[in-house]
Image: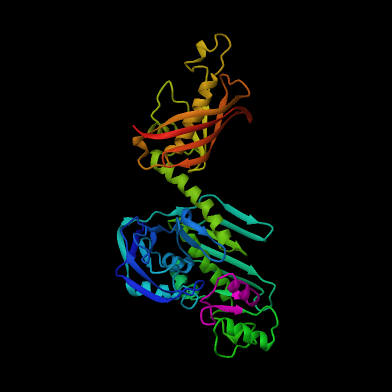
Amino acid sequence: MIANQRTIQNEASLAGTGLHTGNKTRVTFKPAEPNTGIRFRRTDIENCPEIPADIEHVIDNFRDTTLGIGNIHIRQVEHVLAAVYGLEIDNILVEIDSNEPPVGDGSAMPFVEVLQQAGIQEQDAPRDYIEIQETIAYSDPEKGIDMVVFPSDEFRITFMVDYRNPALGTQYTSMYSLTDEFVTEFASARTFCFLDEVEALYDKGLIQGGNLENAVVIVDRQLSQDELQKLADKFGIKQEVALGSNGILGGKQLRYTNEPVRHKTLDLIGDLALLGAPIKAHVMAARSGHATHVELVKKIRQIYKAKKLTRKYQTIPAKKGVLLDCNAINRILPHRYPFLLVDKIIDVVPTERVVGVKNVTQNEPFFPGHFPGHPIMPGVLIVEAMAQTGAVLMLETVQNPETKVAYFMAIDNVKFRKPVVPGDQLIMEVEMIRFRPTSCKMMGHAYVDGDLVCQAELMAVIMDK
């Protein structure tokens, strides 16, 4: 069954204080057209551009997720994103009159309630899912972080954390249905931190708007009453502050016995919104945070963009292990026989690297003259084959690539290592070194049976046909 994209029916707003900045701020949600995605805009900055909520615009992920363009940024967006993603809203404009949304009670529920009041409307455009077909893993052994993404017909999350603090210990949760469980089981889980972190974060200029009403503070060390009072004075807390018999500052009661791990799940949902499209996968995470989530999203996003490239040009299913066959390459490159020197593309990371294949047969038109009785592929054509492979990567970085052509301006540091002869299969790996809107520099390597046969630096400019 094909699902359609969704937006909100009416404009809706929420005001409050930013967690880290302490700024008074208002966020306003507005409907958006199909295929707009989630976008943010600062209304306190004149002529402010819209900032897409995608991985390419993440500029910081130390204690939260910060989006930005140039010197314009908006921090602590993960709870807003979690609310939008959790309600399965595809297109929305989020306007903020400061550099941080209001923290509310430290959960995503205030945003969820405002969006629900605005109403959700189905749009006349199909939803584009990211469907995971192969297992993706990311780990950081030094920090004990592991994340694995498995193929699944629905979006699911399994999250585990283990803290040395006895108030938390090991916690585990699973979400099997975003539609059925997000609002009731995860949206109201509040942000938390350890008491030992509080002063350090405050002294770094963070959590300036933090208090016991918008965060759960876990007691991880003993404090005297004098130390507690100094802490209360620093944060402007007027009432008496107690350590709490349940291990939580002020004795605040948890909304769930495993509320901290549910909030970690909430953060993960918000960070997965940075994919730019809903995902069908089972994500398993252990001890991960924003920085790890961003790295995982980058990996998934690369796979998604490669598959979009295949769908765009590959009109018939390609063989296993082939992203673009010769027919698809004909739709991208202007070259034709006898000068089309790429047979297929077997791997691509858009804007980063591409791997192409040239099967060198004895029927190549250049062999009778190079050389009679001793056929060798001309070195200049090996370089040309690498350049054409790179052009596939380069042209896909611009809009309407079918109207563009890549002209190579310079070729530097060319080295030929071994001859290429009939029967060889040339594997060409081209990596983007520097990219600008109209030009780029790439590094190409060509291999036969794993041996390097040629390498070169390639510089090109993109022009209209």
Residue ID at (58%, 74%): 202
Q: Position of residue 207 (x, y in %)?
A: 54, 73
Looking at the image, the residue that sits furthest to the top is 372
Magenta range is 193-217
Whether residue 328 is visible: no
Q: Position of residue 277 (x, y in %)?
A: 43, 56
Q: Quadrant of the C terminus?
A: top left
Q: Position of residue 304 (x, y in %)?
A: 47, 49
Q: Quadrant of the N terminus?
A: bottom left
Looking at the image, the residue that sits furthest to the bottom is 240
Relative to 399, residue 226 above or below: below
| Magenta stretch contains residue 134 | no
Residue ID at (45%, 29%): 408
Coloration of the structure image: rainbow
The reply, left or right, for residue 90 in relation to residue 228 is left
Name the foreground residue: 154 vs 243. Answer: 243
**What is the quadrant of residue 425 in the picture?**
top right
| Magenta stretch contains residue 199 | yes
Name the foreground residue: 306 vs 400. Answer: 400
Q: Position of residue 463 (x, y in %)?
A: 37, 34
Residue ID at (43%, 43%): 309
Whether residue 51 is visible: yes
